[in-house]
Structure formats: structure tokens, C-alpha cells
Image: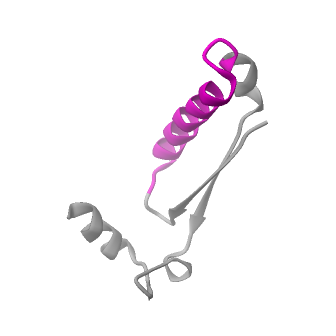
Amino acid sequence: MPLIQIKVLEGTLTTEQKNEMIAKVSNIVAEIEAGPQAKEKLLPHTWCIIEEVAPAHWGIGGNPLSIDILKALLAG
């Protein structure tokens, strides 16, 4: 039984985006672990947890990460 743990900055993903991430990542992990033919047997037993981390509890470069910093990083 695979367990997938994903950590994201709190408030950066909508419910729909989280649902899409859970579905896509779970499918890929099940396919890689079980092979394409057995994926359907493993997928119902593949756990996925998305944990949202408060910006003050997440750091980059020795500083707390904020949504503004994340947006700037993504924008390049």
C-alpha cells in the first residue's frame, strides 16, 4: 500500500487543485509500483495526504516563506 505525502504552502491550492493532484499522483504511483495492468488493483489501496504548511513554518534561504515570495519565485 503506497502512502504519498505532499506538503504545500497553506492557501496556495484550491480544493479542485488538491483533488486533481491526489488523482493524478495516485494514478502515477500505482502504475509505477504495480505496472499498467495491475494499477487498478493497487489504486484503491493508494493513500495520498496533502498537508498544508503555514508560511511561518516553511522557510527558504534561511527566511520564512510567504505567498508573495512563492509567487515571485514562480514568476521567475
* Residue 15 within the segment the image draws in magenta: yes
In percent of width and height, residue 15 lies at: 51, 47
Q: Is residue 21 left or right of residue 30?
A: left
Please determine whether, in this image, residue 67 is positioned above or below residue 8. Answer: below
**In which quadrant of the rendered view does residue 28 lie?**
top right
At a point 20% along the width and 64% down the height, the residue shown is 76
At a point 44% along the width and 88% down the height, the residue shown is 62
Dominant secondary-structure state across the stretch colored magenta: helix
Q: Is residue 69 left or right of residue 34?
A: left
Front-most of residues 49 and 2 = 2
Task: State how many labels appear.
Answer: 0
Q: Is residue 24 left or right of residue 74?
A: right
Residue at the far top in the pictured view: 37
At a point 43% along the width and 60% down the height, the residue shown is 12
Front-most of residues 75 and 52 = 75
**In which quadrant of the rendered view does residue 39 lie?**
top right
At a point 52% along the width and 46% down the height, the residue shown is 18
Residue at the far left in the pictured view: 76
* Residue 3 within the segment the image draws in magenta: no
Please determine whether, in this image, residue 38 is positioned above or below residue 22. Answer: above
Instruction: Give the magenta part as a residue range.
Output: 13-39
Please determine whether, in this image, residue 39 is positioned above or below residue 59. Answer: above
Residue at the far bottom in the pictured view: 62
**In which quadrant of the rendered view does residue 1 lie?**
top right
In percent of width and height, residue 11 lies at: 47, 63
What is the basis of the colouring in this image?
Answer: one colour
